[in-house]
Amino acid sequence: MHYDYLVVGAGLFGAVFAYEMKKNGKTCYVIDKRDHIAGNIYTEKQLDINVHKFGAHIFHTSDKEVWDYVNQFAEFNHYINSPIAVYKDELYNLPFNMNTFSKLWGIKTPAQAKAIIAEQIAELGITEPRNLEEQALSLAGKDVYEKLVKGYTEKQWGRDCKELPAFIIKRLPLRFTYDNNYFNDPYQGIPKGGYTQIVEKMLEGIPVELGVTYKEFREKSRDTYGKVLYTGMIDEYFDHKLGYLEYRSLRFENEQLPEEENFQGNAVVNYTEREVPYTRIIEHKHFEFGKQPGTVITREYPAEWKPGDEPYYPVNNEKNDALYKAYAELASKEENVLFGGRLGQYKYFDMDKTIRAALDMALAEQESFS
């Protein structure tokens, strides 16, 4: 067989691209090294609950075109992301807002909160932050930093905040309203029935082969392809010949609690102390306002990435960005190969940005052959 496109990766980027190409009369063949489609947005039924297997995925966007697009494939509920933070035996609302400040300081008004934060920042006298700790202190003051930022960030990155560059925290959103909605985007929700169905519908009628790497597939396949869309790690495509790009990884500890109806009362609870090894606990049923008799929770542990591990977050520091730029230069010389997604473009994408980038690439391809 001859296909117009070989799509490497059955995640959201690859699925959107393949769907758009098929819609425009092109043939695609999709492969993925995992044993399931949908990449990191894969959801799986456990105790009749849609479990987010690779961490919490909350769809949010300001892009109405993308919102309308994704609603073709699933009906979304009205879930609003309102995480809780636990520090020792204290509970705080996130994002940092008047509910947070009222709990911290026993105050009521925005003017009182602003005055306390300004006073703490002034006492520190940091004019040119040299690291992440100084940057966060200069933005939010001592109390917010020590209780809600420091431990969580150090767990996420596996390093002391003094060893992390200041640019990682360019800003800390401080909201002086009693509003626990984490995202400012006007469109937000969770697909009723989970995310996997979205990718299933996108890939309907398109041949998909799972459990095979790009390298293995090339060695065994007798089919031919006009172009390749590669959504894997860009450095892996080039056999790491310029060196390894760095990532942070995650480990998920899943627990089914068939006898417990409600474990924590919220979908996402963050643990901000360094001493607690996990960063958050997700209780999946709350994403869809579930009434099931049991529940499923997942503890999320950040991990240092090493070759062979699943890469989750690119480490976009100066060294890695320079290395990616060198790989991107090599990629630009590859004939008939497109690179897309967070691994192919070494950039963290929210789901809406992933869809937008895939639609833009598909449109560019359509224009090239029209």
Image (cartoon, rainbow, N blue to C red):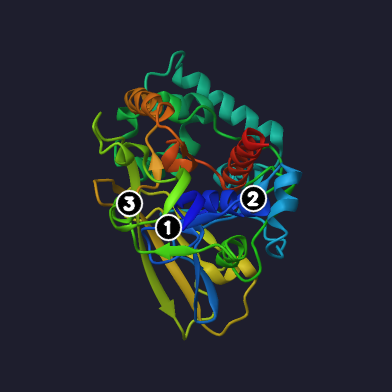
Amino acid carrying label 3: it is: Arg
Q: Residues within 10 Å of mark 1 (few under 14, many from 20)?
A: many
Q: Identify the residue at image location x=46%, y=29%.
A: 136
Amino acid carrying label 2: it is: Glu
Q: Nearer the viewer, residue 57 or 26?
A: 26
Query: Label 1: which residue?
Result: 31
Q: Is residue 203 visible?
A: yes
CA distance for labels 3 and 2? 24 Å
Amino acid carrying label 1: it is: Ile
CA distance for labels 2 and 1? 17 Å
Query: Label 2: which residue?
Result: 20
Q: Residue 170: give x, y in percent of width and height.
A: 51, 27
Instruction: State left or right for residue 219 relative to residue 325.
Output: left
Query: Label 3: which residue?
Result: 218
Q: Earlier in the sequence, mark 3 or mark 2?
A: 2
Q: Identify the residue at image location x=25%, y=39%.
A: 239
